[in-house]
Image (tube, rainbow, N blue to C red):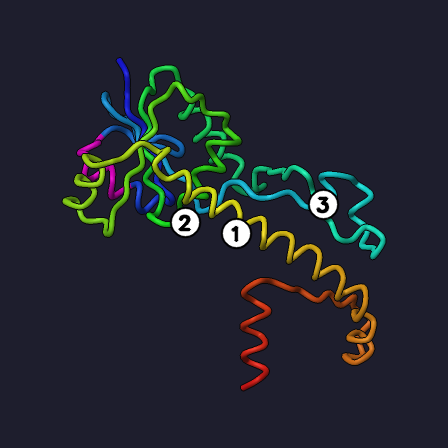
Amino acid sequence: MSKSLYIAEKPSVAAEFAKALKISGKKQNGYIESEEAIVTWCVGHLVTMSYPEAYDPALKKWSMATLPFLPKKYRYEIIPNVKKQFAVVKELLNRGDVDKIYVCTDSGREGEYIYRLVDQEARVPDTKEKRRVWIDSQTEEEILRGIREAKPLSAYDSLADAAYLRAQEDYLMGINFSRALTLKYGNEIQRFLNTKKWSAISVGRVMTCVLGMVVRR
């Protein structure tokens, strides 16, 4: 018997979907299953972009000579402390009796990105029907409406592309500028703080802008 799989962004949301769908099956290790359906969840991000040393161990050492770091193809890896849940989700996504997948991660760019990374790393075949649930709240009525009106996942490909691009931009800015500024000014900051601890300068697309606003105030 074929089953539908519902994947939420976090356990609390998965519980609301199970309640709305009247799935009263036994709660397993990382999912809830009944005769007709399965509900599982991520715990936020399960997959992340790999650090430079994953491309080349020599890049673990910070050096101006290796900057800028601009990979031709980005690598991804499972976040260590959520490997167990990723394994659960991966197995469910690829189960032979699961023929339809409802993506129920948060309705937005980041929620889209969270699932797309899981789909990518779990190597979910395109032969499975994938539909996107887009809701504005977690009431039973809204959840059921979202499921009824779920569009093909491909309808959100542009949103996924935007999410990947944003993540890559953040990655390149963080890796390259953090290393460059640390190598150039880290020792001076260390002397200014009168500490023997190595001082790293963290740079981020949002973080650095907010820091600048705080300084100007």
Is disc 3 surrounded by few (<14), some (14 to 19) or many (20+) residues within 10 Å? some
| Type of amino acid at the residue the image marks with label 1 | Arg
Residue 166: assigned label: 1
Q: At which x and y percent is residue 89?
A: 43, 31
Q: Is residue 193 above or below residue 115?
A: below
Q: At which x and y percent is residue 178?
A: 70, 61
The residue that mark 3 highlights is 52
First in residue order: circle 2 vs circle 3? 3
First in residue order: circle 1 vs circle 3? 3
| Type of amino acid at the residue the image marks with label 3 | Pro
**How many discs mark residues in the rendered view?**
3
Magenta-span inclusion, residue 154: no
Which stretch did the figure color magenta? 15-24
Q: Secondary structure at mark 2?
A: helix
- Which mark's residue is nearer the viewer, 1 or 3? 1
Magenta-span inclusion, residue 22: yes
How much space separates mark 2 and mark 3, taking CA atoms? 25 Å
Asked whether the residues under the numbered discs 2 and 3 touch, taking CB atoms below 8 Å apart as contact, a structural biologist would say: no
Residue drawn at the location 60% of the way across and 38% of the way down: 76
First in residue order: circle 1 vs circle 2? 2
- Which mark's residue is nearer the viewer, 2 or 3? 2
Check the image and name the residue furthest to the bottom: 217
How much space separates mark 1 and mark 2, taking CA atoms? 10 Å
> Considering the image in quadrants, where does the N terminus appear?
top left
Q: At which x and y percent is residue 91?
A: 45, 24
